[in-house]
Image: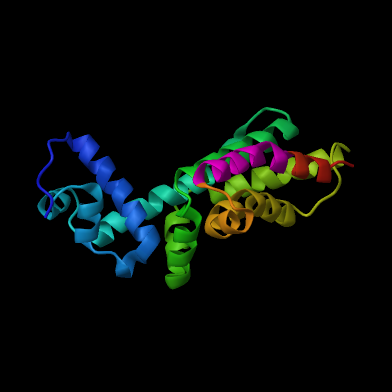
Amino acid sequence: MVDNIDIQPTDAKERIKAAAARIFSLRGLEGARMQDIADEAQINKAMLHYYFRNKQQLFELIFEEKVKRIFSALEALSGSTASFEDRIRSFVDTQISIVLEFPAMPLFVMLEARKNPGLLEEKFGKLPVAAIRTKFSNMVRAEAEAGNIKVVAFDQLFVNIMSLCVFPIIAEPMIRHVLDKDEASFRDLIEARKKLVADLIIHDLKP
């Protein structure tokens, strides 16, 4: 049992949310226990229940926050007034940075969405996903019509960008083993990919 720790309410909530995100990413909703979350946050279970009634309430809060973080970079991409190339570079940089903050986040979201297909629709329904997608698609088409980039299927471009940004971080254990990387050198590799991935995408789009 962990004793009460003298921390401010805001700090306590953030610690609980960070701990819950780690536990949920490792064990999912079904496998996580409130005691595990309390132990991870270094508080007692009574304090945890003071802020959150049950793990379902906590899970829904964490899930929604992570979904919003994943798509926040897309909103910035479609709403920017910078050049197309600069938007791509900014999007790649932001997306990799977001996933690096919580490497298990994409896998966490996808695994829970597979278990409950209605979960994504429920959470995405509160986000302007369709509007963002339309803006991004129109931007790509306008660039192609202006001769700045080659004609490309928007769906394939989006999947390529997301895959190049997210997969290496999800696959960290395998990549570190195969390439014999420690934690620091792996992070350096991922940081270097911010420029590399943007360069690859931009070069591939050249007319």
> How many callouts does the rendering have?
0
Q: Quadrant of the N terminus?
A: bottom left
User: Residue 23's image quarter?
Assistant: bottom left
Q: Residue furthest top?
A: 82
Q: In which quarter of the image is the C terminus?
A: top right
Per the image, is 194 magenta? yes
- Name the colour scheme: rainbow
Nearer to me, 199 or 77 = 199
Per the image, is 150 magenta? no
What's the magenta region? 183-198
Q: Identify whether 51 is placed above or below 56.
A: above
Nearer to me, 78 or 27 = 27
Work out whether residue 42 can be spotted.
Answer: yes
Residue 45 at x, y = what percent? 13, 55
Tell me: 81 left or right of 28: right
Q: Identify whether 52 is placed above or below 27.
A: above
Residue 68 at x, y = what percent? 46, 47
At 71% from the left and 40% from the top, the residue drawn is 196
Q: Identify whether 153 is placed above or below 118.
A: above
User: Residue 123's image quarter?
Assistant: bottom left
Considering the whole magenta stretch, tell me its main secondary structure. Answer: helix
Tell me: 23 left or right of 146: left
At 46% from the left and 43% from the top, the residue drawn is 101
Nearer to me, 99 or 177 = 177
Residue 62 at x, y = what percent? 35, 52
Tell me: 13 left or right of 201: left
Q: Which residue lies furthest to the front in this view?
A: 180
